[in-house]
Amino acid sequence: MEIDFRELGDHKIIEVSGEVDLYNVSELKKALFSITDGNYHSVIVDLKNVNYMDSSGIGALVAGQKKMRAHNGRFGLMNIHEDVLNILRLATLDKFFKIYDSEEEII
């Protein structure tokens, strides 16, 4: 898994690539917690290059969402692969997260 950061206007974007599972989820948690500490008003996780995510990855995203809410910030997901989106739908988390189809929707 690879993680990169960039900015899009007032939003901090985390670009995640590769599979997110129990073996590497700590990297994602570390990245999320490093920017959900109240320094950014909006954090968006770009999952365009993630085609597999297990429950530990979903848990990391939920924790990031909760941490941002604690700081009155916004947290969203973008460019979700259909397989990952289906997992979110099964857990009804597609209603929990703000989901964007593209960067144009965010701006």
Image (tube, grey):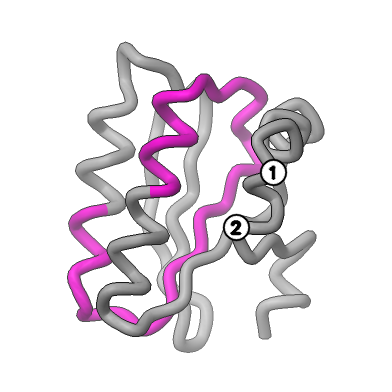
Residue visible at 52% across and 24% down?
18
| Element carrying mark 1 | loop
Q: What stretch is highlighted in magenta?
A: 33-62
Amino acid at dot 2: Phe
Q: Quadrant of the N terminus?
A: top left
Q: Is residue 75 left or right of residue 49?
A: left
Amino acid at dot 1: Thr
Residue visible at 35% across and 15% down?
22
Is residue 33 positioned above or below 102 on the image? above
Residue 53, image x, y percentages: 55, 24
Q: In this view, does 86 lie to the left or right of 71?
A: right
Q: In this view, does 27 lie to the left or right of 16?
A: left
Q: Which of 74 and 39 is in front in this view?
A: 74
Q: In this view, does 42 lie to the left or right of 64?
A: right
Q: Which of 57 and 45 is in front in this view?
A: 57
Residue 32, image x, y percentages: 30, 52
Neighbor class of circle 2 (other Cα within 10 Å; few <14, some 14-19, many 20+) is: few
Residue visible at 43% across and 69% down?
43
